[in-house]
Image (spheres, rainbow, N blue to C red):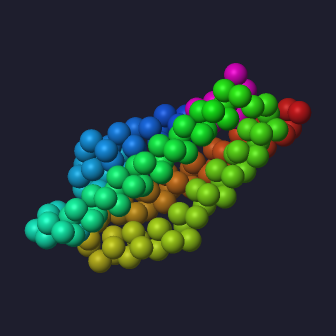
Amino acid sequence: MNILTIAISAFILLESLNVLTLYFAPGSQMGNGLGVFGAWEKSKTDPEMHQFIRYLVYWVAGTKLIFICLLGVILLTTGDATKQLTVVALIASISSFFWRLFPIIKSLDKAGHITPPGYSKTLGIMIASFIGVFALALAWSLVRM
C-alpha cells in the first residue's frame, strides 16, 4: 500500500465518521456536528427553519457520501497517476474551506455563538492538517517515482 492510498484511506475514514455524525447525531459537538453552533438549538424553536437546516445538513452528508464512494472507486481501480491527481483535487477542494467557511465560523466564534469557544481555530488547524498531510503524501509519491 503506497502513501497516497494510506492518505486517501485515512480521509475516507474520517469523512465517513463525519457523515455518520451528520446523519445520526447532527446536534453533536463531536465529529463536526452542528451542536457547536448556538443557532442549531435556536432553530428548534422555529420548526420550519429547523426542517430547512436539517435538510441542508443531510444534503451536506449526502454530498460527502458521494465523494467518499468516488474516492473508494479511485482507490480500488486506478494507478498512481490518478491517485496523485485525486490528491491535488482534494487539496484544492478542501482549501476552499478557508475562502468561504472559515471566515463565517471565525466571526461566529468571535461573537460567542460557537461552543466551545475557540473551536474555529481548532477546526482551521484540523483542515490545514488535512491539506498538509495530502501535500506531504503527494510530494513523497512524486519523489518516489
Residue 9 x/y as whole percent: 58, 32
Residue at image x 40%, y 63%? 120
Magenta span of residues = 1-9
Based on the picture, tell me whether residue 92 belongs to the magenta stretch.
Answer: no
Residue 30 x/y as whole percent: 31, 46
Based on the picture, tell me whether residue 2 belongs to the magenta stretch.
Answer: yes
Residue at image x 66%, y 45%? 134
Relative side of 138 to 33, left or right: right
Residue 144 occupies quadrant:
top right
Residue 38 visible? The answer is: no
Residue at image x 47%, y 68%? 102
Residue 94 visible? The answer is: yes
Report the label total.
Answer: 0
Residue 55 x/y as whole percent: 31, 59
Quick check: 33 above or below 46?
A: above
Residue at image x 25%, y 44%? 25
Residue 121 or residue 26, whichever sits in front: 26
| Dominant secondary structure, magenta | helix
Residue 110 occupies quadrant:
bottom left
